[in-house]
Image: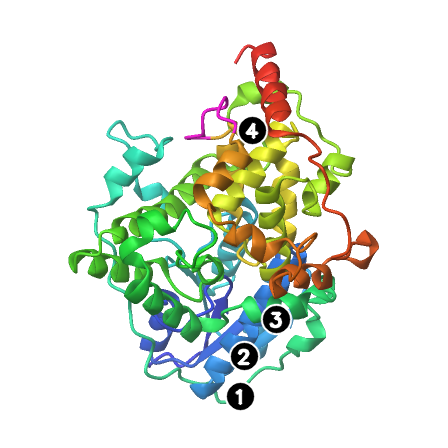
Amino acid sequence: MTDKTPILMWFRRDLRLSDHAALTAACESGRPVIPVFIHDPLVAELGAAPKWRLGLGIGALADSLNARESRLVLRRGEDALTVLQELVTQTGASSVYWTRLYDPSSVSRDKKIKETLKDQGVEARSFGGHLMFEPWSVETKTGGYYKVYTPFWNSVKTTGVDTPRPAPKAIPAPQDWPESDKLDDWNMGAAMNRGADVVRPFVQLGEQAAQDRLAGFIADIVAGYKDTRDLPGVDGTSNLSENLALGEISPHQCWQAGERALEEGKQGAETFLKELVWREFAYHLMHHTPHMLDSNWREEWEAFPWRTDPDSDEVIAWKQGRTGIPFVDAAMRELYVSGRMHNRGRMIVASYLTKHLMTDWRIGQAWFEETLIDWDPASNAMGWQWTAGSGPDASPYFRVFNPETQLDKFDRDRAYVSRWIAEERGKPHSDALAFFDAIPRSWKLSPDCVYPDPVVTPADGRKRALDAYENRGF
């Protein structure tokens, strides 16, 4: 007898229909498919900006499913396992499919769910798709994991990436649909307050927008990407991190487009492929050394005398984009207005916080976790530790980026600074003014404020950092 029991398709950070191994397998089974999203504690614990952006992504996925004569069932609960068990009972489903995640909290949750459902006679299957290479599938010649990026890149660059799958032609619907929460009732943007209206125009929402963004990048930007990616004042990057973080596009789709561009002679495409693998490397490390999310990857840094007060005057100035260092402040304001930050800016603000201000990288990591719409647990942790010097494949600890010479090199005409800093300018850019609409009113900042002197000058900060390193015997 043919099995016609429904499959629960549990969506998480895979908010797309194309190149979706779990969804494809469910649809090809010929059985009814019930798409589900669960608002569990791991969703509830997200920072303000990533939670708000996830809510938008869920809505876009629901619209895509509706267009395919399907729907997205929303459920909220304190335990995802309990929610799934309730849905199994209510729908008669005998299978649950999902795309794997790799952060320790998700792994622990999913392992328990898989074991429990199987013990209860329910098929539980996890699929790849969030990464091109499963973290346990890439090993050194001696059998260990890679701790340095370049050998990792050399190992995977010719491995071959799976060809992206098309979206299913049809998503078989069940005879009866279970009840669903209303997305608006989840109020996922509550913590954004008035900032949501400021950031929203910068969002490229949903699967189709992500595909359009990729196509535009490949057509117009990728050829010169090796150089333009470091220039924050020009549109020289893919901006796909926002969509990759929520799985609105797959890394396989990006890789295929990059490979095709490279074959067409667009040399910057190789750098783009390397950046995709940098993301993979972050997940590779998070899988093998999960302590990198909250502890110094290099144990010798545990005794380093970081400043740990998240509310010190210097840290508050950093958070507010009021350090008096234009490159740092422009990048922090870009974050508030757009929900993202240029990669060069991320390095500069991280270096300034951890080296000039001698502040624990985890304070910066937590702030990004609260404010980035493209927040990603592996990339965020590795990026901060790379800059601080405490992580794998780190920037040399003694490298202290000078934010003034970096500005001269990468924003020579000050296009970036002019776009994001309003104070003491005759006709400030609209994006610079938008910063004051996005920030908390309690900060009491306005375009009429005097731009501050540096809280720590580049020279003083560098000396302070190098003295600390020398005293610790680094």
Frontmost residue, 154 versus 266: 266
421 sits to left or right of 377: right
382 vs 84: above or below = above
Frontmost residue, 459 versus 469: 459
Q: Are marks 2 and 4 in contact (CB under 8 Å)?
A: no
Identify residue type, mark 1: Asp
Q: Are marks 3 and 2 in contact (CB under 8 Å)?
A: no
Q: Are marks 1 and 3 in contact (CB under 8 Å)?
A: no
In 3D space, how far apart are the residues under numbered discs 4 and 1 (Cα atoms)? 51 Å
Identify residue type, mark 4: Asn
> Who's the residue at 53% across and 88% down the image?
176
Q: Are marks 4 and 1 in contact (CB under 8 Å)?
A: no
Q: In this figure, which residue is indicated by the disc labeled 3?
A: 86
Magenta span has 394? yes
The residue stretch that appears in magenta: 392-400
Dot placed on the residue nearer the N-terminal end, 1 or 2: 2
Q: Secondary structure at mark 2?
A: helix
Which dot marks residue 176? Answer: 1
Q: Position of residue 345 (x, y in %)?
A: 52, 45
241 vs 395: above or below = below
Q: Nearer the viewer, mark 4 or mark 3?
A: 4
Frontmost residue, 248 versus 11: 248
In 3D space, how far apart are the residues under numbered discs 2 and 4 (Cα atoms)? 46 Å
Identify residue type, mark 2: Thr
Q: Are marks 1 and 2 in contact (CB under 8 Å)?
A: yes
> Who's the residue at 72% across and 64% down the image?
437
Q: Secondary structure at mark 4?
A: loop
> Who's the residue at 52% across and 27% down the image?
400
Identify residue type, mark 3: Glu
Q: Main secondary structure of the magenta part?
A: loop
In 3D space, how far apart are the residues under numbered discs 4 and 3 (Cα atoms)? 41 Å
